[in-house]
Amino acid sequence: MILYAWTGRGPKLPVASLPRTIPEQRPECLDRGSPRAAHRVRRRHHWRSVLGVAHRCIVPFTAFSEYEDASPKGKKQIRWFAPRDRGVAYFAGLYRVWYGDYGSKKEPNEGDHVLFGFLTTDANDLVRPVHAKAMPVVLTDQAACEEWLNAPPEEIEAIQARALPADALEIVGDEEAAQFVGGHLK
């Protein structure tokens, strides 16, 4: 699974090896940290200061997972979702620089860190039976990515509220999903 953020602007970060589906832009890798979903981002104080276009990014992915709500207690089932053509799609993301210790006691890592999260929205008809609460805001083409990267802050809620058509993704079968264990392709 690909979890690299791509902005087309901002600090120079190590370049990732990604398919070039949006011409004339280079991916920039956020090389530390795990993504955090930003559900109802306009209401979250942490992200309010970064709603402008300077802090927008797109987060390419080949598949994402959600825990199945009906999982037995203590045995959460993971279900994977991927674009039907198994190509790359994108999450609508935000990033910011944070100064602090982002390491362990054994290996402290104090300094500036680029953190990112991606927006979530209400689950669509495909995801809702698995995970009813929410799903990432998925951008499926260049126009949607450009809109996200350039829209004024007052349009974020409208972009976030758009329902992804159920046929844009499909649930990945168990055999195919086995390649995603550990958060990356084997």
Image (cartoon, helix red, strand yellow):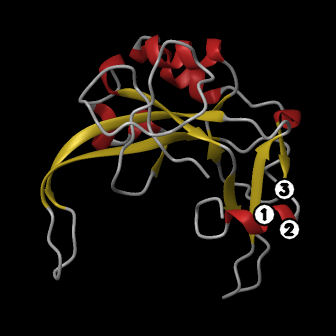
Q: Eyeballing the image, is 103 above or below 47?
A: below
Q: Residue furthest front?
A: 17
Query: Pointer 1: what residue?
Result: 177
User: CB under 8 Å between callouts 3 and 1?
Assistant: yes
User: Which three-letter amino acid code belongs to the residue tagged 3?
Assistant: Val
User: Which three-letter amino acid code belongs to the residue tagged 2?
Assistant: Asp
Q: Quadrant of residue 158?
A: top right
From the top left corner, tell me how far across and down residue 131 is, in percent: 73, 58
Q: Eyeballing the image, is 77 above or below 97?
A: below
Query: Pointer 3: what residue?
Result: 172
User: CB under 8 Å between callouts 2 and 1?
Assistant: yes
Q: Residue at x 50, y 15 (%)?
A: 155
User: Which three-letter amino acid code belongs to the residue tagged 1?
Assistant: Ala
Q: Tell whether 45 sits left or right of 65.
A: left
Nearer-N-terminus badge (3/1): 3
Q: Tell whether 145 sits left or right of 79.
A: left
Q: Eyeballing the image, is 109 above or below 144?
A: below
Query: Pointer 2: what residue?
Result: 174
